[in-house]
Amino acid sequence: MMVRSALLNVTMAAARKAARSLVRDYGELEQLQVSMKGPADFVSSADIKAEKTLRQELKKARPHYGFLLEEGGEIAGDDKSHRWIIDPIDGTTNFLHGIPNFCISIALERDGEIIAGVIYQPLGDEMFHAERGAGAFLNERRLRVSARRKLEESVLTTGIPFLGRPGHEVFLKELGAVMKTVAGVRRFGSAALDLAYVAAGRCDGYWEAGIKPWDIAAGIILVREAGGYVTDYDGGTRMMETGEVVASNDHLHQPMLKLLKTARG
Ligand code: LIP
Protein backbone atom coordinates (compact mmCIF):
# COMPACT_ATOMS: atom_id res chain seq x y z
CA MET A 1 0.00 0.00 0.00
CA MET A 2 1.50 3.30 -1.12
CA VAL A 3 2.06 5.93 1.61
CA ARG A 4 0.91 9.33 0.36
CA SER A 5 1.27 12.76 1.96
CA ALA A 6 -1.64 14.26 3.88
CA LEU A 7 -1.79 16.99 1.22
CA LEU A 8 -2.28 14.52 -1.63
CA ASN A 9 -4.78 12.50 0.39
CA VAL A 10 -7.04 15.52 1.04
CA THR A 11 -6.72 16.64 -2.59
CA MET A 12 -7.66 13.22 -3.95
CA ALA A 13 -10.55 12.91 -1.49
CA ALA A 14 -11.91 16.28 -2.68
CA ALA A 15 -11.63 15.16 -6.32
CA ARG A 16 -13.44 11.90 -5.63
CA LYS A 17 -16.24 13.69 -3.73
CA ALA A 18 -16.79 16.21 -6.54
CA ALA A 19 -16.65 13.42 -9.13
CA ARG A 20 -19.67 11.67 -7.62
CA SER A 21 -22.03 14.45 -8.77
CA LEU A 22 -20.17 14.82 -12.08
CA VAL A 23 -20.63 11.15 -12.99
CA ARG A 24 -24.32 11.34 -12.05
CA ASP A 25 -24.78 14.49 -14.14
CA TYR A 26 -22.86 12.97 -17.05
CA GLY A 27 -25.25 10.02 -16.98
CA GLU A 28 -28.26 12.36 -17.16
CA LEU A 29 -26.78 14.20 -20.14
CA GLU A 30 -27.79 11.35 -22.44
CA GLN A 31 -31.41 12.44 -22.06
CA LEU A 32 -30.53 16.14 -22.29
CA GLN A 33 -28.87 15.73 -25.70
CA VAL A 34 -32.35 15.58 -27.22
CA SER A 35 -34.09 18.15 -25.03
CA MET A 36 -35.16 21.43 -26.65
CA LYS A 37 -33.34 23.53 -24.02
CA GLY A 38 -30.17 21.63 -24.81
CA PRO A 39 -27.54 20.54 -22.30
CA ALA A 40 -25.41 23.72 -22.22
CA ASP A 41 -27.09 25.20 -19.13
CA PHE A 42 -27.04 21.79 -17.47
CA VAL A 43 -23.28 21.47 -17.96
CA SER A 44 -22.60 24.90 -16.54
CA SER A 45 -24.56 23.90 -13.40
CA ALA A 46 -22.57 20.64 -13.24
CA ASP A 47 -19.36 22.67 -13.55
CA ILE A 48 -20.38 25.09 -10.80
CA LYS A 49 -21.61 22.29 -8.49
CA ALA A 50 -18.33 20.40 -8.81
CA GLU A 51 -16.26 23.54 -8.27
CA LYS A 52 -18.29 24.38 -5.14
CA THR A 53 -17.62 20.92 -3.68
CA LEU A 54 -13.90 21.18 -4.44
CA ARG A 55 -13.63 24.61 -2.88
CA GLN A 56 -15.53 23.55 0.28
CA GLU A 57 -13.45 20.39 0.77
CA LEU A 58 -10.09 22.06 0.14
CA LYS A 59 -10.96 25.04 2.32
CA LYS A 60 -11.79 22.66 5.18
CA ALA A 61 -8.37 21.02 4.76
CA ARG A 62 -6.32 24.22 4.20
CA PRO A 63 -8.49 27.13 5.44
CA HIS A 64 -6.05 29.92 4.61
CA TYR A 65 -5.04 29.02 1.05
CA GLY A 66 -6.28 31.05 -1.91
CA PHE A 67 -7.96 29.82 -5.11
CA LEU A 68 -7.78 30.35 -8.86
CA LEU A 69 -10.97 28.76 -10.17
CA GLU A 70 -12.13 28.36 -13.79
CA GLU A 71 -15.66 29.42 -12.85
CA GLY A 72 -15.13 31.43 -9.64
CA GLY A 73 -11.99 33.34 -10.60
CA GLU A 74 -9.26 34.48 -8.20
CA ILE A 75 -10.06 34.25 -4.46
CA ALA A 76 -7.25 35.49 -2.21
CA GLY A 77 -6.50 33.58 1.00
CA ASP A 78 -4.86 34.81 4.22
CA ASP A 79 -1.86 32.66 3.29
CA LYS A 80 -0.44 34.60 0.35
CA SER A 81 2.08 31.87 -0.55
CA HIS A 82 -0.39 29.14 -1.44
CA ARG A 83 -3.25 28.90 -3.90
CA TRP A 84 -5.23 26.04 -5.42
CA ILE A 85 -5.62 26.16 -9.22
CA ILE A 86 -8.77 24.25 -10.20
CA ASP A 87 -10.63 23.17 -13.33
CA PRO A 88 -13.75 21.32 -12.15
CA ILE A 89 -14.42 19.83 -15.60
CA ASP A 90 -11.53 19.88 -18.05
CA GLY A 91 -12.95 18.60 -21.30
CA THR A 92 -16.20 20.51 -20.91
CA THR A 93 -17.22 20.15 -24.56
CA ASN A 94 -16.64 16.39 -24.35
CA PHE A 95 -18.78 16.27 -21.20
CA LEU A 96 -21.50 18.32 -22.92
CA HIS A 97 -21.60 15.93 -25.90
CA GLY A 98 -21.40 12.73 -23.85
CA ILE A 99 -17.84 12.02 -25.03
CA PRO A 100 -16.17 10.07 -22.18
CA ASN A 101 -12.92 12.04 -21.90
CA PHE A 102 -13.03 14.67 -19.15
CA CYS A 103 -11.42 15.12 -15.74
CA ILE A 104 -11.10 17.17 -12.59
CA SER A 105 -7.78 19.03 -12.40
CA ILE A 106 -6.39 20.39 -9.11
CA ALA A 107 -2.95 21.94 -8.63
CA LEU A 108 -1.35 23.54 -5.58
CA GLU A 109 0.98 26.46 -6.17
CA ARG A 110 3.48 27.70 -3.54
CA ASP A 111 5.19 31.07 -4.17
CA GLY A 112 4.47 30.79 -7.89
CA GLU A 113 5.68 27.20 -8.29
CA ILE A 114 3.41 24.17 -8.78
CA ILE A 115 4.22 21.73 -5.94
CA ALA A 116 1.40 19.18 -6.28
CA GLY A 117 -1.12 18.08 -8.87
CA VAL A 118 -4.11 15.73 -9.11
CA ILE A 119 -5.95 14.88 -12.34
CA TYR A 120 -8.92 12.57 -11.82
CA GLN A 121 -10.68 10.90 -14.76
CA PRO A 122 -13.75 9.54 -12.96
CA LEU A 123 -15.30 7.30 -15.65
CA GLY A 124 -12.14 5.21 -15.75
CA ASP A 125 -11.29 5.81 -12.09
CA GLU A 126 -7.82 7.02 -13.13
CA MET A 127 -6.21 9.15 -10.40
CA PHE A 128 -3.08 10.80 -11.77
CA HIS A 129 -1.08 12.50 -9.02
CA ALA A 130 2.31 14.03 -8.33
CA GLU A 131 4.15 15.99 -5.67
CA ARG A 132 7.39 17.90 -6.20
CA GLY A 133 10.34 15.55 -5.72
CA ALA A 134 8.12 12.51 -5.00
CA GLY A 135 7.39 11.22 -8.51
CA ALA A 136 4.25 10.92 -10.63
CA PHE A 137 1.69 8.13 -10.30
CA LEU A 138 -1.45 6.70 -11.87
CA ASN A 139 -3.31 5.20 -8.91
CA GLU A 140 -0.50 3.10 -7.36
CA ARG A 141 1.66 2.81 -10.48
CA ARG A 142 4.76 5.00 -10.94
CA LEU A 143 4.76 6.93 -14.22
CA ARG A 144 7.55 7.64 -16.69
CA VAL A 145 7.28 9.57 -19.96
CA SER A 146 7.88 7.56 -23.16
CA ALA A 147 11.44 6.72 -24.19
CA ARG A 148 10.91 7.29 -27.91
CA ARG A 149 13.79 9.17 -29.52
CA LYS A 150 12.39 9.90 -32.98
CA LEU A 151 9.45 12.09 -33.97
CA GLU A 152 8.70 9.73 -36.88
CA GLU A 153 7.91 7.00 -34.32
CA SER A 154 5.87 9.32 -32.07
CA VAL A 155 2.19 9.99 -31.45
CA LEU A 156 1.51 13.60 -30.43
CA THR A 157 -1.65 15.09 -28.98
CA THR A 158 -2.86 18.65 -29.41
CA GLY A 159 -5.79 21.04 -29.16
CA ILE A 160 -7.52 22.38 -32.26
CA PRO A 161 -8.89 25.95 -32.20
CA PHE A 162 -12.57 26.15 -33.10
CA LEU A 163 -15.37 28.66 -33.72
CA GLY A 164 -14.71 31.80 -31.70
CA ARG A 165 -11.14 30.80 -30.76
CA PRO A 166 -8.11 32.58 -32.43
CA GLY A 167 -5.12 30.93 -34.12
CA HIS A 168 -6.73 28.88 -36.90
CA GLU A 169 -4.17 29.78 -39.60
CA VAL A 170 -1.08 29.29 -37.45
CA PHE A 171 -2.42 25.98 -36.12
CA LEU A 172 -2.94 24.74 -39.70
CA LYS A 173 0.73 25.55 -40.42
CA GLU A 174 1.84 23.65 -37.30
CA LEU A 175 -0.41 20.67 -38.08
CA GLY A 176 0.77 20.61 -41.71
CA ALA A 177 4.39 20.26 -40.56
CA VAL A 178 3.66 17.82 -37.72
CA MET A 179 1.47 15.41 -39.73
CA LYS A 180 4.31 14.96 -42.28
CA THR A 181 6.75 14.12 -39.50
CA VAL A 182 5.08 11.87 -36.87
CA ALA A 183 3.39 8.48 -36.59
CA GLY A 184 0.07 10.01 -35.49
CA VAL A 185 -1.75 13.06 -34.13
CA ARG A 186 -4.58 12.87 -31.59
CA ARG A 187 -7.08 15.45 -30.29
CA PHE A 188 -8.68 14.21 -27.06
CA GLY A 189 -10.30 17.51 -25.95
CA SER A 190 -8.79 17.88 -22.48
CA ALA A 191 -5.43 19.59 -21.95
CA ALA A 192 -5.11 18.16 -18.43
CA LEU A 193 -5.58 14.60 -19.70
CA ASP A 194 -3.27 15.31 -22.67
CA LEU A 195 -0.52 16.16 -20.17
CA ALA A 196 -1.42 13.17 -17.99
CA TYR A 197 -1.12 10.90 -21.05
CA VAL A 198 2.34 12.33 -21.80
CA ALA A 199 3.35 11.68 -18.17
CA ALA A 200 2.06 8.10 -18.51
CA GLY A 201 3.92 7.54 -21.79
CA ARG A 202 0.65 7.00 -23.69
CA CYS A 203 1.48 9.96 -25.93
CA ASP A 204 5.02 11.06 -26.73
CA GLY A 205 4.28 14.78 -26.77
CA TYR A 206 1.61 17.48 -26.58
CA TRP A 207 1.35 21.04 -27.80
CA GLU A 208 -1.43 23.65 -27.66
CA ALA A 209 -1.93 27.42 -27.67
CA GLY A 210 -4.73 29.48 -26.17
CA ILE A 211 -4.80 27.39 -22.99
CA LYS A 212 -5.72 28.54 -19.45
CA PRO A 213 -3.66 28.09 -16.27
CA TRP A 214 -6.27 25.74 -14.73
CA ASP A 215 -6.11 23.49 -17.83
CA ILE A 216 -2.37 22.80 -17.43
CA ALA A 217 -1.24 23.54 -13.84
CA ALA A 218 -1.63 19.98 -12.51
CA GLY A 219 -0.35 18.41 -15.75
CA ILE A 220 2.87 20.43 -15.60
CA ILE A 221 4.06 18.80 -12.39
CA LEU A 222 2.84 15.36 -13.52
CA VAL A 223 4.99 15.47 -16.67
CA ARG A 224 8.02 16.89 -14.85
CA GLU A 225 7.82 14.32 -12.03
CA ALA A 226 7.52 11.61 -14.71
CA GLY A 227 10.88 12.74 -16.15
CA GLY A 228 9.50 14.91 -18.97
CA TYR A 229 9.76 18.54 -19.99
CA VAL A 230 7.06 21.22 -20.13
CA THR A 231 7.85 24.64 -21.61
CA ASP A 232 6.26 27.48 -23.49
CA TYR A 233 6.74 27.70 -27.27
CA ASP A 234 10.13 29.40 -26.81
CA GLY A 235 11.44 26.73 -24.47
CA GLY A 236 10.90 28.93 -21.42
CA THR A 237 8.62 28.54 -18.41
CA ARG A 238 5.94 31.18 -19.11
CA MET A 239 3.19 28.64 -20.07
CA MET A 240 0.74 30.00 -17.47
CA GLU A 241 1.15 33.54 -18.83
CA THR A 242 1.42 32.83 -22.57
CA GLY A 243 -1.18 30.06 -22.74
CA GLU A 244 1.22 28.14 -25.01
CA VAL A 245 2.55 24.74 -23.93
CA VAL A 246 4.81 21.99 -25.29
CA ALA A 247 5.37 18.79 -23.30
CA SER A 248 7.52 15.76 -24.14
CA ASN A 249 10.55 13.68 -23.14
CA ASP A 250 14.21 14.75 -23.23
CA HIS A 251 14.81 13.29 -26.72
CA LEU A 252 11.82 14.89 -28.46
CA HIS A 253 11.31 18.21 -26.72
CA GLN A 254 13.82 20.29 -28.64
CA PRO A 255 12.88 18.69 -32.02
CA MET A 256 9.22 19.51 -31.28
CA LEU A 257 10.02 23.13 -30.39
CA LYS A 258 12.10 23.49 -33.59
CA LEU A 259 9.47 21.83 -35.82
CA LEU A 260 6.68 24.07 -34.49
CA LYS A 261 8.79 27.24 -34.64
CA THR A 262 9.80 26.55 -38.25
CA ALA A 263 6.19 25.78 -39.20
CA ARG A 264 5.02 29.12 -37.76
CA GLY A 265 7.64 30.89 -39.89
C1 LIP B 1 -10.42 22.70 -22.78
C2 LIP B 1 -8.98 22.28 -22.87
C3 LIP B 1 -8.68 21.74 -24.27
C4 LIP B 1 -8.89 22.85 -25.27
C5 LIP B 1 -10.34 23.28 -25.22
C6 LIP B 1 -10.76 23.74 -23.82
P1 LIP B 1 -12.15 23.21 -20.84
O1 LIP B 1 -10.65 23.20 -21.49
O2 LIP B 1 -8.72 21.30 -21.92
O3 LIP B 1 -7.37 21.25 -24.39
O4 LIP B 1 -8.53 22.42 -26.55
O5 LIP B 1 -10.52 24.32 -26.13
O6 LIP B 1 -10.07 24.93 -23.52
O7 LIP B 1 -12.81 24.40 -21.46
O8 LIP B 1 -12.81 21.95 -21.21
O9 LIP B 1 -11.92 23.38 -19.37
Image: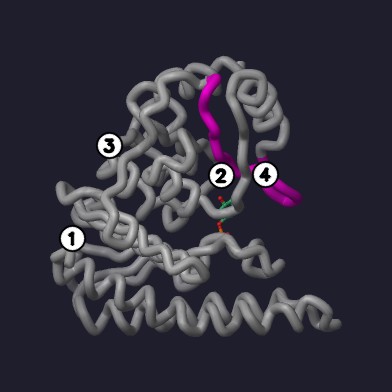
Q: For the residue marked with disc 2, what is the amino acid?
A: Gly
Looking at the image, can residue 76 be seen?
Answer: no
Marked residue nearer the N-terminal end (1 or 3): 1
Secondary structure found at label 2: loop
For the residue carrying disc 4, how many other residues have a C-alpha within 10 Å: few (<14), some (14-19), or many (20+)?
some
Residue drawn 51% across and 36% down?
207
Residue nearest the observer in this picture, 155 or 39: 155
Task: Identify the mark at residue 81; answer none if there is no mark.
Answer: 1
Disc assigned to residue 210:
2
Rounded to the nearest whole Å, what is the CA distance between mark 1 and mark 2? Answer: 27 Å
Kind of residue at badge 3: Gly
- The answer to whether the beta carbon of the residue marked 4 is less than 8 Å from any atom of ligand 1 is yes
User: Under tag 4, what secondary structure?
Assistant: loop
**Amino acid bearing label 1:** Ser
Query: In the rendered structure, which disc, 2 or 4, sits on the residue that comes first in sequence?
Result: 4
Q: Residue furthest front?
A: 1
Q: Is mark 2 within 8 Å of ligand 1?
A: yes
Mark whose residue sits in front, 2 or 3 = 3
Label pair 2/4, CB-CB below 8 angstroms = yes
Residue 227 numbered tag: 3
Of callouts 4 and 3, which one flags the residue occurring earlier in the amino acid sequence?
4
Tell me the tag on residue 161: 4
Q: Residue at x 54, y 33 (%)?
A: 155
Q: Does residue 119 lie above or below 132 as drawn? A: below
Of 245 and 16, nearer the camera is: 16
